[in-house]
Image: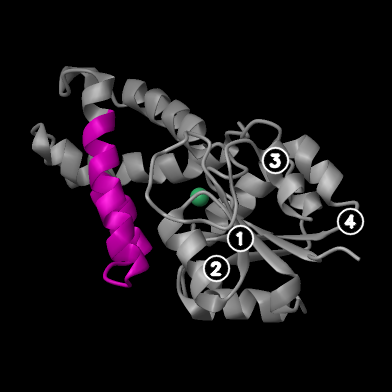
Amino acid sequence: MQKYKHLFFDLDHTLWDFETNSLHTLLQLFDKYRLSSSFISFDDFYERYQKHNQMLWIHYREGKMTKAQLNFDRFHTPFNQVGISDETIAQNFARDYIAISPTKTALMPHAIEVLEQLKQSYTLHVITNGFKEVQYLKLKNSKLRPYFSKIFISETIGASKPKTAFFEYAVKSANARKKESLVVGDNLETDIDGAINFGLDYIYFNPNKIEHKRQLMNEISDLKEITTCLK
Ligand SMILES: [Mg+2]
């Protein structure tokens, strides 16, 4: 008898190659908005954006800001830092980013072949903290959607990972039992701590082999290693 029946996958940077897709979108928009006349380089813009965006996502997860505020401010602040204070530019840029990034389709290495194999024996679900309209488009455009039974998005549920309410809702709605469920995700705070706090088994996917001091149940750097953790 197999130990697990339901596998819950994070989407961004676990299956959908967020870094590559986001980078390509930002490069395209950097060009469109002629930002090279304001920033020293694309890297200068990208570093400022990333730093600020990460901080805003923490605020968003804690319910301290809306997604519209997040999407505007993550561009407006770096723009403002280099003297682009016109809010319309940040608004248009933010709108374009939301429209273009989900059309990008780069996936993490071996994502499709691993899902293809897993779907034979497991029921697969997505658990993600992203924006509803964006995450559905990503799944559709990158051809991931058919592999999954249910898609759980924080915005729809009204609670974000790592909140127990999120995981509880997902497991219940999937008609899964906790013992038969496993979480696969790349984020220690949202995916892994969320799984631990609700009492679910998990696999920490660490493709960049980021160092940490945690004692973890399962850790992999290639999606192909998932099968070795399922026994
Ligand atoms: Mg992720």
Precedes in sequence: disc 2 or disc 3: 2
Local crowd at mark 4 within 10 Å, few (<14), some, or many (≥20)?
Answer: few
Instruction: From the image, tell me which residue sits under label 2.
Output: 195
Q: Is residue 75 above or below residue 40?
A: below
Percent coordinates x, y for residue 154 in the rendering = 51, 68
In the rendered structure, which segment of residues is drawn in magenta?
46-74
Q: Are marks 2 and 1 in contact (CB under 8 Å)?
A: yes
Using the rendered image of the protein, determine whether residue 200 is visible from the camera's viewpoint: yes
Is residue 69 within the magenta segment? yes
Whether disc 2's CB lies below 8 Å from ligand 1 is answered: no
2 left or right, relative to 43: right
Precedes in sequence: disc 2 or disc 1: 2
Is residue 225 within the magenta segment? no
Percent coordinates x, y for residue 116 in the rendering = 84, 42
Q: What secondary structure is marked by label 4?
A: loop
Q: Are marks 1 and 3 in contact (CB under 8 Å)?
A: no
Q: Are marks 2 and 3 in contact (CB under 8 Å)?
A: no
Instruction: From the image, tell me which residue sits under label 1.
Output: 202
Question: How far apart are the alpha carbons under marks 2 and 3?
Answer: 19 Å
Instruction: From the image, tell me which residue sits under label 3.
Output: 225
